[in-house]
Image (spheres, helix red, strand yellow):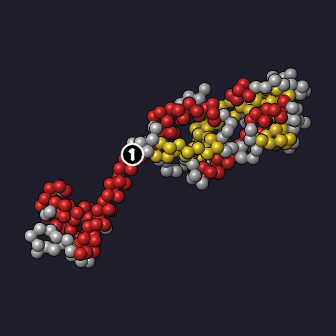
């Protein structure tokens, strides 16, 4: 049903006449009368007892009037909700962040967004970057933080580039060096993150380009455990430089991995052509303007 016709019908009853209803609706009496007639045509029965001196509802008119009040109230509620969403007084922001580096890089941005938009509910998914890309592709989150490169069906904005550091035990044969290349690790088992972390892909691809299949000694999703494994001499672990200092441990040496294509490049990623809510667009604008030094 046409909500304009319902509104005209309701106002005729509320204002006790067509002329008074027209004044409220800023319409002529004729326009209001046509709207009510159109509604009656759609219903297929009279809604008003017109011979009466004042508008009086027929039994069907009473049923339509009661339902019209609810429909118009729901319309007003919907418009109010849309206004709040557009005004960023309400809404939901769905983010996917990996455990590696997110605390350092995104906590200040979270605080800034929360201060600006306290009514927005931030729903956070924490997974490895590769897994987050899968969730993003399904539309279950608005943005993911992932390592570059990403698939062509994503838009990406690089927010931080760091050298990838190799962590080995202090008594490892390579420990005295400042830099190494991936080929230097041909005989050293690797300690990788668990499946779902894009950093694994970067390292393994580099090994393949160098012509060897790496031996994987262990996998974990916990940075501290990876560092402890490296300290114990299990193999070589990898972290971006911004995390090395905060996870420093006696008995572990960090070396720059000087290898083309292995820099840790974190980006904010979203689906090409996807609908973004006002809350999501506000987050993107904030992230694109932020400095992640």
> In the orientation shown, which residue stands out farthest toward the left?
53
Q: Residue furthest bottom?
A: 44
Q: Residue at x 87, y 35 (%)?
A: 234
Which quadrant of the view contains residue 38?
bottom left
Whether residue 209 is visible here, answered yes or no, is: no
Q: x%, y% of residue 121? A: 50, 44
Residue 184 placement (x, y as % from top left): 86, 32
Residue position for label 1: 84
Q: In this orientation, which residue lies closer to the viewer: 176 or 251?
A: 251
Between residues 234 and 28, which one lies in front from this camera angle?
234
Vertical position of residue 69 compared to residue 239: above or below? below
Q: Is residue 64 above or below residue 132?
A: below
- Which residue is drawn at the image coordinates 75% and 47% (left, top)? 195
Residue 107 found in image quarter: top right
Residue 69 in the figure: left or right of residue 204: left
Q: Is residue 68 left or right of residue 183?
A: left
Residue drawn at (82%, 26%) of the image: 252
Residue 119: image location, x then y, percent? 45, 41
């Amino acid at each position: 049903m046409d909500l304009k016709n319902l509104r005209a019908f309701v106002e005729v009853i509320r204002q006790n006449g067509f002329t008074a209803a027209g004044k409220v609706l800023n319409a002529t009496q004729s326009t209001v009368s046509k709207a009510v007639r159109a509604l009656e045509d759609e219903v297929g029965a009279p809604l008003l007892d017109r011979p009466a001196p004042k508008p009086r509802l027929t039994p069907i008119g009473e049923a339509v009037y009661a339902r019209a009040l609810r429909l118009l109230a729901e319309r007003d509620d919907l418009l109010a909700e849309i206004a709040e969403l557009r005004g960023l007084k309400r809404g939901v922001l769905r983010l996917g962040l990996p455990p590696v580096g997110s605390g350092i890089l995104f906590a200040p941005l979270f605080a800034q967004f929360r201060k600006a938009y306290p009514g927005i509910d931030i729903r956070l998914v924490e997974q490895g970057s590769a897994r987050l890309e899968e969730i993003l592709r399904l539309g279950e989150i608005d943005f993911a933080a992932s390592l570059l490169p990403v698939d062509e069906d994503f838009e990406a904005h690089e927010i931080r580039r760091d050298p990838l550091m190799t962590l080995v035990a202090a008594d490892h044969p390579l420990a005295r060096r400042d830099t190494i290349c991936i080929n230097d690790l041909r005989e050293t088992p690797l300690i990788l993150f668990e499946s779902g972390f894009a950093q694994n892909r970067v390292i393994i691809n580099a090994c393949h380009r160098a012509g060897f299949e790496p031996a994987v000694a262990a996998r974990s999703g916990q940075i501290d455990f990876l560092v402890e494994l490296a300290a114990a001499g299990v193999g070589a672990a990898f972290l971006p430089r911004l995390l090395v200092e905060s996870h420093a441990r006696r008995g572990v040496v960090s070396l720059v991995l000087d290898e083309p294509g292995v820099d840790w490049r974190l980006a904010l990623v979203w689906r090409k052509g996807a609908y973004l809510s006002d809350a999501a667009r506000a987050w993107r604008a904030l992230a694109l303007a932020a400095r992640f030094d």
